[in-house]
Amino acid sequence: MRSIIVESRRKSKATLEKAWPGARIVDVTSKATDVFVQFSPFYPHGDIPIPFSGDTTAMSAEGIWQGLKVFANSDVCFNSFENRTMKNIKRTVKRFGPPLGHRKGITGTELLNYAEARREIYLPVYRWVLHHKTATLLTLLRETPGDLVLLDYETNCDVNNLRKPLSHAGLIKAYLEDKYPGC
């Protein structure tokens, strides 16, 4: 039976090849040098619907995640939604103060806590990207014979583990296995 494995992009090629002999290794981060960079949440696909925001769209999944994040000194950031560069998207505590939550829509009054935002914003947005923007790439991965290793900077595949950022490679794996959270 074929396996899909999530590994750290920080591991060396030799280490990965030794651990997974014969597997196809695919970098799905913003540093990928091939078409699979399109799996990066930072990739500017464009026209991605912002949850709870009517017809308003953004360039990237990460732009939505960061743009709806509310800090003590900063509210919704429209620049994050419009970022096409895959750079300078993250908004930090150091610059904006403590995070208060994620705004439920660009004009919403409700703030979602981290767990709620992960389930109501990030998961649906990334699933939408997989379904509408990367379907051809998903087909290529499905047709890959043998084991498949997906590289990501984060390796937390447990949606309920809030101590670590969620791995989008883990979400790709779940999608390919018809186990995407909330399905």
Image (spheres, rainbow, N blue to C red):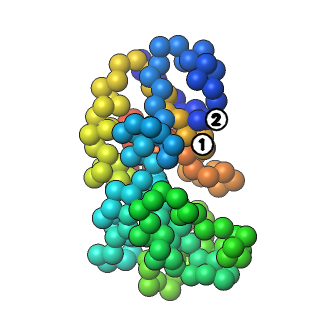
Left or right of residue 123: residue 161: right
Dot label at residue 119? none
Q: Residue at x 46, y 53 (%)?
A: 41
Q: Give the amino acid at mark 2.
A: Arg
Earlier sequence position, callout 2 versus callout 1: 2
Left or right of residue 176: residue 108: right
Q: Is residue 116 above or below residue 56?
A: above
Using the image as rendered, state which of residue 4 and residue 8 is in the foreground.
Answer: 8
Position of residue 148 measured from the top left corner of the image (x, y, whole percent): 45, 25
Q: Is residue 161 visible?
A: yes
Q: Give the amino acid at mark 1.
A: Tyr
- Mark 2 and mark 1: Cα distance apart in space: 7 Å
Q: Is residue 155 above or below residue 123?
A: above
Q: Which secondary structure lies at badge 2?
A: loop
Image quarter in which the N terminus is found: top left
Q: Is residue 19 visible?
A: no
Position of residue 152 measured from the top left corner of the image (x, y, whole percent): 55, 40
Tag 2–tag 1 contact (CB < 8 Å): yes
Q: Residue at x 28, y 34 (%)?
A: 139
Q: Residue at x 26, y 40 (%)?
A: 136
Left or right of residue 106: residue 133: left
Using the image as rendered, state which of residue 13 and residue 54 is in the foreground.
Answer: 13
Dot label at residue 153? 1
Q: Quadrant of residue 123?
A: bottom left
Using the image as rendered, state which of residue 87 and residue 183 is in the foreground.
Answer: 87
Q: Is residue 85 above or below residue 151?
A: below
Position of residue 12 measured from the top left corner of the image (x, y, whole percent): 63, 26
Q: Residue at x 56, y 72 (%)?
A: 69
Dot label at residue 10? 2
